[in-house]
């Protein structure tokens, strides 16, 4: 595990979960069936639902299981149906691509969609929200912490504004459990989570909510009619267990990751052609988005990969694309700088010695790249 520095996109399954899979495999009944095996699967899923809500401190919420964060974020937009006469939507320009890429369709459906600008430090412009939020605004979407820069957003201030006008405040928190102190006292109206972000199996996510959303898919009555289709029992059970593990060791995990991040960033700061995006902002404990001015990020990613260190050019949702990150563009980062940016993220299994070793690799690698490209 030690060479993974792309934990935001390459997250292994927790070893304790791997031990449970042989047992969970035998919960093979369809949760919608009323026979013994079906009831066993149904009860396991319902327990997982309550375990997740408890682990994340969401006593006033309900929760629907989905296939992942992308589906949860799409399901959240169904709350627009609760405000049929309101035609304005506010979406953070640095939101996840699965929200931002819905903007053309929402506009085609007749909504006025305003993209909330961001500062060079990666923080949304609260003055913009204060200026344009009003009684005609139905929905506001915001990442609690950026999946590329790790910058934490001023959600309390945003909630004060949405409360004033009765706006549905959706918050994508998929990136934050185990990476910052989890606190939902600001009371968003709906929240997205993802299993594989916290060392559970891929293929499961959740949308927590106070008011029942409207289904986008139709079929059976699974998930109380909110998400038809046979449930991914194995992934759901891993999701709940992962949440319990992560949240029970939250402080220790955050402190460890922060120490590792500082080791890596101290090494990077030795070079005058380096700029860490959002460095002056409050960030989650394990993400570094760094511009290496003039160095082509793709070649550096490949070089580090050959050495056994995995970093990325940004979010896995578009890192294979030639397009420049919409997040960095929204922050006012120049195209050339964005094309020299890599994202480094440590994880639960990264030890201090691993971070120090990687820091040494960066110190020895970057000068060579600088000689060629600068």
Image: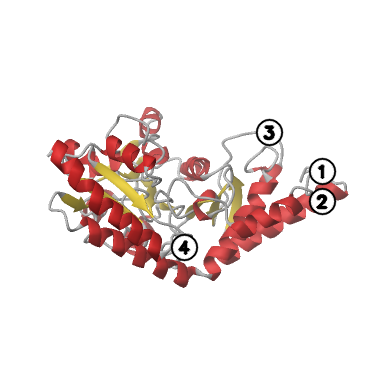
Name the residue tied to disc 2.
39
The CA span between labels 3 and 1 is 15 Å
Of circles 3 and 4, which is in front?
Answer: 4
The CA span between labels 4 and 1 is 36 Å
Dots 3, 1 in contact, CB < 8 A: no
Name the residue tied to disc 3.
219
Identify the residue at horizontal 70%, vertical 51% (top origin). Answer: 21
Q: Earlier in the sequence, mark 2 or mark 4?
A: 2
Dots 2, 1 in contact, CB < 8 A: yes
Q: Earlier in the sequence, mark 3 or mark 4?
A: 4
The CA span between labels 3 and 4 is 35 Å
Secondary structure at numbered mark 1 = loop
Residue 120 to residue 302: above or below: below
Rendered image: mark on residue 178: 4
Q: Earlier in the sequence, mark 3 or mark 1?
A: 1
Question: Within 10 angstroms of label 1, few (less than 14), some, or many (20 or more) residues?
Answer: few
Residue 128 to residue 259: above or below: above
Of circles 2 and 3, which is in front?
Answer: 2
Residue 164 to residue 365: above or below: below
Q: Nearer the viewer, residue 374 or 136?
A: 374
- Quarter of the picture containing the C terminus is top left
Q: Earlier in the sequence, mark 2 or mark 1?
A: 1
Q: How is the image coloured?
A: secondary structure
Q: Nearer the viewer, residue 284 or 293?
A: 293
The CA span between labels 2 and 1 is 7 Å
Dots 2, 3 in contact, CB < 8 A: no
In the image, is 288 to the left or to the right of 19? left
Asked if residue 75 can be seen in this view, the reply is yes
Query: Which quadrant of the view contains residue 228?
Result: top right
Rendered image: mark on residue 33: 1
């Amino acid at each position: 595990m030690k060479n993974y520095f792309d934990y935001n996109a390459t997250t292994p399954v927790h070893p304790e979960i791997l031990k449970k899979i042989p047992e969970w495999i035998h919960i093979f009944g369809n949760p919608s069936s009323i026979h013994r095996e079906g009831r066993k699967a149904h009860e396991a899923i319902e327990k997982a639902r309550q375990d997740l809500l408890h682990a994340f401190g969401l006593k006033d919420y309900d929760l629907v299981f989905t296939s992942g964060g992308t589906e949860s974020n799409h399901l959240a937009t169904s709350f627009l149906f609760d405000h049929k006469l309101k035609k304005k939507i506010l979406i953070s320009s640095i939101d996840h691509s699965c929200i931002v890429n819905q903007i053309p369709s929402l506009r085609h459906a007749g909504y006025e969609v305003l993209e909330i600008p961001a500062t060079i430090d990666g923080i949304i412009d609260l003055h913009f929200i204060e200026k344009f939020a009003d009684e005609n605004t139905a929905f506001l979407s915001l990442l609690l912490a950026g999946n590329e820069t790790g910058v934490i957003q001023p959600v309390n201030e945003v909630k004060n504004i949405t409360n004033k006008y009765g706006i549905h405040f959706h918050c994508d928190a998929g990136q934050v459990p185990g990476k910052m102190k989890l606190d939902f006292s600001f009371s968003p109206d709906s929240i997205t989570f993802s299993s594989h972000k916290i060392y559970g199996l891929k293929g499961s996510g959740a949308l927590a909510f106070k008011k029942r959303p409207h289904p986008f898919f139709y079929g059976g009555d699974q998930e109380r009619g909110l998400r038809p289709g046979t449930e991914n029992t194995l992934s759901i059970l891993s999701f709940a267990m992962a949440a319990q593990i992560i949240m029970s060791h939250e402080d220790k995990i955050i402190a460890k990751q922060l120490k590792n991040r500082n080791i890596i960033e101290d090494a990077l700061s030795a070079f005058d052609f380096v700029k860490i995006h959002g460095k002056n902002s409050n960030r989650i404990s394990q993400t570094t988005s760094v511009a290496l001015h003039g160095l082509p990020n793709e070649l550096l990613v490949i070089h580090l990969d050959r050495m056994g260190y995995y970093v990325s050019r940004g979010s896995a949702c578009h890192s294979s694309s030639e397009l420049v990150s919409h997040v960095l563009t929204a922050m006012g980062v120049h195209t050339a700088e964005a094309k020299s940016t890599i994202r480094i993220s440590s994880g639960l299994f990264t030890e201090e010695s691993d971070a120090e070793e990687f820091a040494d690799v960066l110190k020895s690698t970057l000068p060579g790249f600088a000689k060629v490209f600068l």
